[in-house]
Every structure is written in C-alpha cells, then in structure tokens.
Amino acid sequence: MSNLGKAFDHGKAFVAFITCGDPDLETTAKAVRAMAEAGADLIELGIPFSDPTAEGPVIQSANVRALAAGTTTDKIFEMVKELRNDVKIPMVFMTYANVVFSYGTGRFAERCAEVEIDGVILPDVPYEEKEEFAPFFDAYGLSLVSLIAPTSAERIAMIAKEAQGFIYVVSSLGVTGVRSEITTDIGALTEQIRAVTDVPCAVGFGISTPEQAVKMAKVSDGAIVGSAIVRLMEKYGREAVPHVAEYVKSMKDALKTLG
C-alpha cells in the first residue's frame, strides 16, 4: 500500500492542509515546500470544488478564490508532479466525490499514482458508499482515508477495521474551522479505534493553537490543521509563505515535546 504510515514514524505527526490554487498554484507549491521544510509530516492538498459541504467559511472562501483563479484538477496534478522532485513526505488529496467522478475515477486514480500521491480523502463519501471508489484506488496502491466522527458510534469498529493509511478523526460536529475549544472526548474515540486496528489516528477539525494540537495528539497519533493555515494564505496572499512556515514550525515544535 501507500507510504502514509511513514508520516507517523517520527513521533506525533503534524498534518497540514492547504487549498490548491489560493491565491495561485505557484504560491501553493512554495507553501507546500516551506511546510515540508518546517516539519510537516504529511500534507493534505485540497482540490477546490464549488460545493465543499464539509468545509467552514474559511476553506469555502479559499475554494471560491482558487476556482476563480482558474485552478483545475489537471493543473494540480502537474504541480504535484513538479513538487515530487524534492518534496518526499507523504501527500494526499482532499476533495469531493463529484470532482473524482467528473474526472473519471479510474483516470483520477491513475494520475494520482503517476504523480506519487499517497492517498485520497473524500469527506462526502460515507463508509457505505466507499466501494464506488476503493477498488480503483486499491488498484493503484492509493489509500482511501476513512473519517471517523463522534457520531460514528456503533460504526466505529466497522470503519476502523478496513481503514487504510491513517484514520482522520473528526474532533467536532459540523464543518471545518477554527474552534476556541474542542469538547469531544477524543481519548475515548481513539481507544475504540485502537481496539480493532493499529492504523494511526490523526485528529482534525478545529485545531489552531499549539496547545490544542498537543492536547489532541496526547490521545492520538497526530494533529491535522487546515483552516488556520488557509486563513494565513487568505490574509497574506502571495506573501504568505514565510508566515505559513513559521506557523507550521511552531505546531511541529509543540508536538515534539510529546516525544
């Protein structure tokens, strides 16, 4: 299978998300390189979509800007191909079923393999419908990353048993976005997952500060941050790269304290 597990080989993993094409793909590529150098263990590349149902206003707006800038799936594949010359950490795409369907699921999986993408996250595809995609991704050695939410309840064991790469643990109900406090009992959730699989768990949705990242990583294998990074891209535009690098370094440094 893919290399996703490698992201969790060096202590608690820091997983960074960025929307491709906001403000443009050239800046995205610079930011990805900077995040990798700053210590990110895994990078999620968001392929923009006109109706991103799992996203809060910050990432929704980034999708709108990226599409307005002329970002396409093909251009993103080309960017990743170029990035792979020097960015060696695992990378996954995060997008929506419609993006993959309209590209052609088999063709999409083939292109992912060609540019050395390690996996795909499709937040709008429930476990019960993953068979529409999984065989295509399996054929090319890609992980279809499972999401487990606080509401998954009796489905947790079922989803975890078949999980690949890593499990995206959704910290809070609702959409992505920065939260002042995460109240879900993530420890109990990850214990249920670990009872049936040793696939690593990383917690996302709402993490923005080093303190939150440490708190979540204590009871899981890593922390995922998206909106806080996308907000920096929105604020600084083409000048965002050093700010993003500094932020990622601060988050990874905090996680290193956990060993």
Image (tube, rainbow, N blue to C red):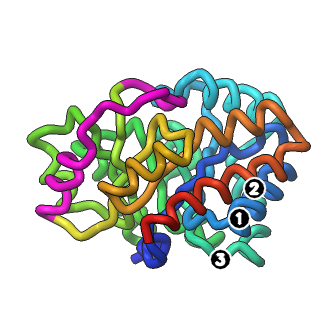
Percent coordinates x, y for residue 168 in the rendering: 37, 51
Residue drawn at x 85%, y 36% is: 236
Residue 191, magenta (yes or no): yes
Report helix, strand or loop for mark 1. loop
Q: Which residue is mark 2?
A: 245
1 left or right, relative to 240 = left
Quote the CA–CA distance across marks 2 and 3. Answer: 17 Å
- Of all residues, the one furthest to the left in this rendering is 154
Quote the CA–CA distance across marks 1 and 3. Answer: 13 Å
What's under tag 2, amino acid-wise?
A: Ala
Relative to the observer, which residue lies in front, 240 or 210? 210
Callout 1 touching callout 3 (CB < 8 Å): no
Report helix, strand or loop for mark 3. loop
| Earlier residue among tags 1 and 3 | 1
Quote the CA–CA distance across marks 2 and 1. Answer: 6 Å
Relative to the observer, which residue lies in front, 237 or 93? 237
> Which quadrant holds residue 42?
bottom right
- Of all residues, the one furthest to the right in this rendering is 239
Q: Which residue is mark 3?
A: 88
- Of all residues, the one furthest to the front in this rendering is 257
Percent coordinates x, y for residue 123 in the rendering: 41, 40
Callout 2 touching callout 1 (CB < 8 Å): yes
**Which residues make up the magenta segment?**
174-196
How many circles with numbers are drawn on the protein?
Answer: 3
Residue drawn at x 21%, y 57% is: 160
Neighbourhood count class around disc 3 (C-alpha, 10 Å): few under 14, some 14–19, many 20 upward: few
Residue 241, magenta (yes or no): no
The image's mark for residue 38 is 1
Give the answer, above or below, for where 179 lies relative to 97. above
